[in-house]
Image (spheres, rainbow, N blue to C red):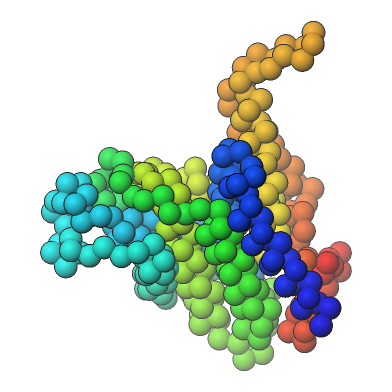
Amino acid sequence: MRSVARLVAALAALALLSWLGPRALPDYFVRVLTVMAINVILVASLGLSNGFTGVFSLGHVGFVALGAYSSGILTLELAKKGAYLPDLPVWLAGVQLGFLPATLLAGVLCAAVGLVVGAPLMRLNGNYVSVAMLGFLIIVNVVLVNADTLTRGARTFTGIDTSTTLPWAVGWMVLTLILLSRVAYSAFGRAMRATREDVIAAQGAGIFILPTRLGAFVIGAFFAGVGGALYAHYLGSFSPATFYFSLMVTQLAMLVVGGQGSLTGAAVGVVLVTLLSEVLRNLERGFSLGALTLPPLYGVSQVVLGMLFILVMVYRPQGLLGDAELTLVERGPDFPAARSGQEVL
């Protein structure tokens, strides 16, 4: 009962923060918190495949892009559709959905694409699947750039309502972490980790490798689509370049820094990298403190983040948290026991 009370208290505190934040904090901090919550969704969904099954995907951002564009098209006002996308198919030109159903449909679409793409690719191992998923990301980008009738091509896709507020982002973040934790620390989650540790031993224990990997991949694709929709309705306008290599590298850095085998690590990585990026970005403009004057150093934030990434990979390759999790509930029989050098917080 105490663990349940702690969980309820934590969720209530998050709900209160998301409600009071826009009223009590400057707009800048509200925006940082909103982006942080969206990134937790994206990085945690990436970690379900990369960390728990060991299938290192470089194409996760492709699902984010698909979710953003599909939600944007579905929620675009009919008058704006006629002006911005005059060549839309008839069945799509007359459709305008609300924010929530469009977000859910974006997730379902990405899950369906993930099922089709993952069925052959999840049979691969090691660097082969990483390169194949990078190819998927490139294909998605090329399609978005050339599908003028649906996406306006390389031009900015604009006119989308900015419905993603801090409460929406935090709410989806909490729901995502709860559902992913139920998946990761279930019997299915044990099968995922078994395929990560030793494929041959997992097969010997009766675990079907392809369905296990594919299930994690599809679930991650769904939440990537949801996060992409939230991102789209936060930005209001974007282009295919928004969801490409830069975002891919940022998300991978957040995941690797925090810990690939931990949902808590994904959240910690997002918080650390986001806060450090914001601090460095403000210092790039230069500042004066008494006799000390620091000139503008544009680009230093990327240099420092790159150095942090290298240091973590050298001295803590499993990430800051490794496989450790912060849990507010009692550990059940499906929760993984701590391995050497790791612990459950």
Expressed as whole percent of the image width and height from the top left, the position of residue 120 reads 41, 73
What residue sits 39% from the left and 56% below the top?
68
| Point 28% across, 40% down: residue | 155
Q: As drawn, is 235 to the left or to the right of 27?
A: left
Q: Where is residue 106 in the image (x, y as percent from the top left)?
A: 38, 65
Q: Quadrant of residue 42?
A: bottom right
What residue sits 58% from the left and 68% below the top? 176
Q: In this view, does 188 lie to the left or right of 235?
A: right
Q: Is residue 193 above or below residue 39?
A: below
Question: Residue 184's quadrant in the figure?
Answer: bottom right
- Image coords of residue 324 (percent x, y): 78, 65
Q: Which of 246 and 223 is in front in this view?
A: 223
Q: Is 16 left or right of 323, judged from the image as shown? A: left
At horizontal 61% and vertical 30% (from top left) the residue drawn is: 281
Q: Is residue 180 visible?
A: no
Q: In this view, does 26 lie above or below 91?
A: above
* Quadrant location, the N terminus: bottom right
Along the line of sight, the residue nearer the viewer: 211 or 236: 236
Q: Quadrant of the C terminus?
A: bottom right
Q: What residue occupies the far bottom of the structure in this picture? A: 206
User: 311 or 226, which lies in front?
Assistant: 226
Label count reads: 0
Q: Where is residue 43 in the image (x, y as percent from the top left)?
A: 58, 58
Whether residue 72 is visible, yes or no, is: yes
Q: Which residue lies furthest to the top in this view?
A: 291
